[in-house]
Image (spheres, grey):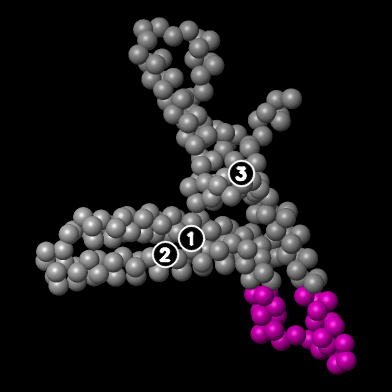
Amino acid sequence: MNSDTMNEPNDWPEEFSGGLWSMLRMKFFYSYMNVILGKGASIHTERAKQKSRNSVSVRDKALTPTELTSHDLYSRPQTMSASNLRARFWELREEQQREETQTSSNTKPRTKTPRELRRSFLTILWRLAKPTYIPAGICQLVYVCLQCTVPQLIRILLTKLESNPNTNFPQFGLPIAGALFVTSILEGISAERQKFLAFQTGIVLKSAVVNAVYD
């Protein structure tokens, strides 16, 4: 393996298919970041050890990296690369033109109005953003539902305690407390995943628009 290959960033891990548990860990808990965080921690630890020594050889200093580089990170997803987005944009545009030609084959050709052109352009952008935007919307829906669940669980708990002061709290309250704990965890996971997918959608749209303008 040559040095150029060794210095290439790692492929985006979410693009590789694996088992269900592996997919959940990557997509919702971002387990692939452990590699980067672990390497950063080892660099920090080694630098701290060198500072604690009275003398450090020049060779040891040269072999110890001072910080993480871009080669320690992951490369961008292939679906978000400028070349792929450009090709996909014009592929959708050609497909749209073929559909319009088949629809208007029996009518006289005419020039599109600005409104029709804008609608065609937005349709292409929607088809580009759909793979990440729809999952982001689902995560947001889950987040909102969980937010509404928390006060309902608290209301059930308080109502039960007020109506029956002598109720065995551990028997009745602990399950609700556990439900509140799980709900809070799922709420955080869904919120962060929604943000992540929303950022991806924004990058896709921005790249597609820039490529369309300057192509």
What count of labels does the image hold? 3
Along the polypeptide, which appears first: circle 3 or circle 1? Answer: 3
Rendering coords of residue 104 (x, y %) = 83, 88
The residue under the point 48% across, 60% down is 194
The residue under the point 75% across, 69% down is 92
Q: In terms of secondary structure, where does tag 1 sit?
A: helix
The residue under the point 72% across, 55% down is 84
Q: In terms of secondary structure, where does tag 3 sit?
A: helix
Along the polypeptide, which appears first: circle 2 or circle 3? Answer: 3
Label disc, if present, on residue 16 of the rendered structure:
none
Which quadrant would residue 147 be assigned to in this image?
A: bottom left
Does the rendering let one see residue 104? yes
Q: Is residue 179 magenta?
A: no
Q: Nearer the viewer, residue 106 or 160?
A: 160
Boundaries of the magenta span = 96-123
Q: Which residue is mark 2?
A: 143
> For the residue marked with disc 3, what is the amino acid?
Pro
